[in-house]
Image (spheres, helix red, strand yellow):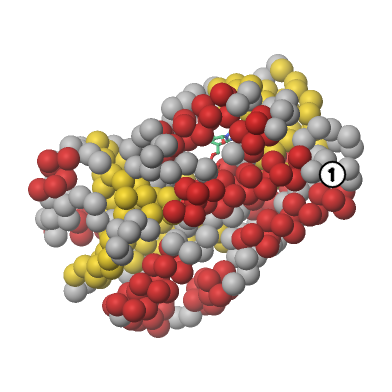
Amino acid sequence: MTAWKLALAGCEVLLIEAKTFPRSKPCAGWITCAAMQAMAFDATTYPHLLVPITRVAIGLHDGLHVTHWPNPVSYGILRRELDDFLLQRARAAGAEIWLGRRVDRVELGQDDALVVVGATQVRGKWVVGAGGASCPVARAVGGKSFWQHRTMVASQTSETPIGIRQLENSGLGTGLPVLFPEPEADGYAWYFTKGDHLNIGVGALGGGPAIPMRRQRFLERLQRAGTLDPSWKLAPFIGHSYALWRGLRQPLAGRNHLLVGDAAGLARDFSGEGIGPAVRSGSLAANFILSQPSGDSEANDHTRQLARLQGHGLITKMGGILEKLPQSFRRTLVESLCRSPWLRRRWVLEKAFLG
Ligand SMILES: Cc1cc2nc3c(=O)[nH]c(=O)nc-3n(C[C@H](O)[C@H](O)[C@H](O)COP(=O)(O)OP(=O)(O)OC[C@H]3O[C@@H](n4cnc5c(N)ncnc54)[C@H](O)[C@@H]3O)c2cc1C
């Protein structure tokens, strides 16, 4: 988003990406309407798989609790396609793109930033850290301690082209994303079909059972329910962890650097939505650079604007409060919220997942 916007405005932009594209990325591939709007495309202009979501189920032990909406409230995408679409759009706007080139080191100087890629060194007035949870710009700012005092989510996910017919004949059919709160009420697992693809995963805060154990427990539950055919060959599960936004912990910009997306730890509490925050913060970074700030104090404006965008509302505060409650109480609370049609729609889905 940053590269696209800056290139459109006529800036000289270099985007350095470690992987070759299209690449897959551990993600459920759920985008909210607000995220889609921030990416400036819609169902008529996006050229890839875009599955409208008009109902969502929450799976509890007594069965599925389904909420419906008259119009799409979100969409399902494949990250391989979405990320490549955004990258190609930045290239078409004039950004230079290096793929398959890992940034080894970043040095933040007084007047510019130095980016080291193998034997190549690049200097720029600004470096935007958009390297996700292992971003080399965040590392240059604070080393490993950058991630201290953050609330981390650990996860594993698998995305497999199973085939439409097979998915339609399975217990849950297609087109109904299902969220299963973890028994410890510290995360959730999901079963999400997108076209002929099945995306299954689990994510949770640290401290409870390990993620491989949760994954196994979830797969057994789906198989017992007849939803997951044991003969389906699922793609390997890939692990990934990222930080949740629970308020501003440290500056997210300096004299010649800006952090965006997972590099800044912006994913939303409860839902884990990170695509919307990533693209909105990417746009904000471009606008900030285009405003031609000159010194340290102006750089704090990016931090302030980002903090305002992310908010300090009830949802941001509630994660920290809930986490401290005894597990049995937390579980009862989560189940009661999910069981009540009104609370499930307004609070669990529309506020925490779609807000
Ligand atoms: C299992 C899982 C499920 C999720 N599901 C959803 C969902 O359904 N909806 C949602 O909104 N969010 C979801 N998220 C969160 C979302 O995926 C992230 O918040 C989002 O991808 C952040 O985008 P980003 O651009 O900041 O980072 P990333 O998408 O991680 O992109 C960072 C890029 O930087 C590159 N990179 C890293 N290091 C270097 C380096 N040294 N040199 C060069 N390049 C480098 C990487 O290769 C990568 O392409 C999920 C996350 C996980 C782990």
**Pointer 1: residues within 10 angstroms few (<14), some, or many (20+)?**
some
The amino acid at mark 1 is Pro
Q: Is residue 18 placed above or below 44 in the rendered structure?
A: above
Q: Is residue 120 placed above or below 128 in the rendered structure?
A: above
Measured from the top left, where is residue 248 in percent x and y?
69, 62
Along the line of sight, the residue nearer the viewer: 325 or 113:
113
Along the line of sight, the residue nearer the viewer: 99 or 224:
99
Q: Is residue 56 placed above or below 342 in the rendered structure?
A: above
Left or right, residue 84 beside residue 141: left
In which quadrant of the rendered image does the N terminus lie? top right
**At x 44% / y 27%, what residue is drawn?**
22
Measured from the top left, where is residue 64 in percent x and y?
21, 68
Could you say whether the residue bearing mark 1 is in a helix, strand or loop? Answer: loop
Q: Quadrant of residue 295?
A: top right
Task: List the residue tagged with mark 1.
Answer: 293
Measured from the top left, where is residue 26 in percent x and y?
42, 42
Q: Is residue 110 visible?
A: yes
Along the line of sight, the residue nearer the viewer: 119 or 161:
161
Residue at the far top: name it.
119
**At x 24% / y 36%, what residue is drawn?**
161
Q: Is residue 208 visible?
A: no
Q: Quadrant of residue 221?
A: bottom left
Left or right, residue 64 beside residue 91: left
Q: Is residue 113 placed above or below 325 in the rendered structure?
A: above
Left or right, residue 20 beside residue 50: right
